[in-house]
Image: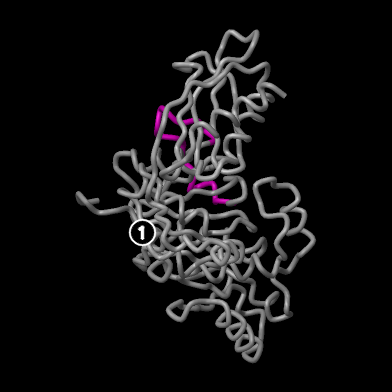
Amino acid sequence: MSAGTKIPATIVTGFLGAGKTTLLRNLLQGAEGKRIALIVNEFGDMGFDGSLVDGCADPDCKADEVVELTNGCICCTVADDFLPTMEMLIARNPAPDHIVIETSGLALPQPLVRAFSWPSVKTRVTVDAVVTVVDAAAVAEGKMTGDLGALEIQRAADEALDHESPIEELFEDQLVCADLVVINKADLITVGDMERVRGEIASHVRASVEVVAAENGKLDGSILLGRGSAAEEDMAARLSHHEAHHADDDDDHHEHNHDDFESHVIDAPGFASLEEAQGAVREAMAIHGVLRIKGAVAIAGKPAPAIVQAVGPRVETWFAREAKAPGRLVVIGLKGISLDEVKAGLARKVAA
């Protein structure tokens, strides 16, 4: 990668059963020397042939975090926090030629694209394209997925997912953010059905979006990679239903600069337990403009401090003897966040 060149990243989204995993497995198997880093929710879901899996070549990583593939690609699992995984990847030497991110079936791509405006990421990586994979047979039958029951179980099991919006809205949100739509399982429908599927998709995507058909997730890598969309710079045209609704309610929405971040270090109180620390941080994360909280805090009666990591609705805490500066938290957010409100949020759960 030459100096000043950003690493392209492709986000692949689509409902459970659409064929994302098969598409990406085929992409890696045909990498032809390109160093592709694939971020997935669970590595076990990928079903790689054993000949592709090597061992972890990075002495600082854990076996369940990074898996080296014999074709030069790497596969990363990301349980809760996308940003540390991205920071780890771009710090590797050599850096990946391309990063591919597979979202879970109901996760919307919009928040993920916005994460590329994070200060430590935006100067190194750009969103090459958002690729939405759809199940041709399901859409031809007027459904979003071939197994709605399994999809609802997946949504109920993940606290981070949207539990309120209708499935139809989530499907449309995945399409409106797309730069490329892959109609997978095209061999399972008739020509007439394909015309109807293309018409349904066309009613939700932007005019510039390419729509291609695929069978068994087989698609040339040149179609998936190298599209140069820079999606993170074009979010106003990709709003989800929820974002569009709030845009209507907020006259300043389109003037707001999502690249405008600030970071502060604040003193944090001690907590009676990990559960109390989680509740306090969750309270502070609810303050308008707060994007991330991280650091170490003291827990009553425990010799080791607790690490705190919070992004969006997810708050993680765990004990770590090597943690430095317990009682200090880094708060990162949009310019103008109220530190007084953040501190009050941390204190409310302690006093409760």
Q: In the rendered view, would you say 282 is above or below 101?
A: above
What is the quadrant of the C terminus in the image? top right
- Does residue 48 appear in the picture of this structure? yes
Q: In the rendered view, would you say 64 is above or below 43?
A: above
Q: Is residue 132 magenta?
A: no
Q: Quadrant of residue 103?
A: bottom right
Depth check, front residue: 30 or 317 = 317
Percent across and percent down for residue 199 are 59, 86
- Does residue 19 appear in the picture of this structure? no
Residue at 66% x, 22% y is: 350
Q: Quadrant of residue 105?
A: bottom right
Depth check, front residue: 96 or 346 = 346
Q: Which residue is mark 1?
A: 32
Q: Residue furthest right?
A: 149
Give the magenta range. Answer: 47-64
Check disc 1 and report its element: helix, strand or loop.
loop
Depth check, front residue: 225 or 59 = 225
Q: Is residue 53 magenta?
A: yes
Residue at 64% x, 11% y is: 300
Percent across and percent down for residue 238 are 49, 67
Percent across and percent down for residue 288 are 54, 45
Few, some or many residues within 10 Å of mark 1 (<14, 14–19, 20+): few
Q: In the rendered view, would you say 170 is above or below 138?
A: above
Residue at 46% x, 81% y is: 207
Q: How is the image coloured?
A: one colour
Q: Is residue 16 left or right of residue 227?
A: right
Residue at 52% x, 66% y is: 239
Q: How many marks?
A: 1
Q: Is residue 27 left or right of residue 79?
A: left
The secondary structure that dominates the magenta segment is: loop
* Amino acid residing under circle 1: Glu
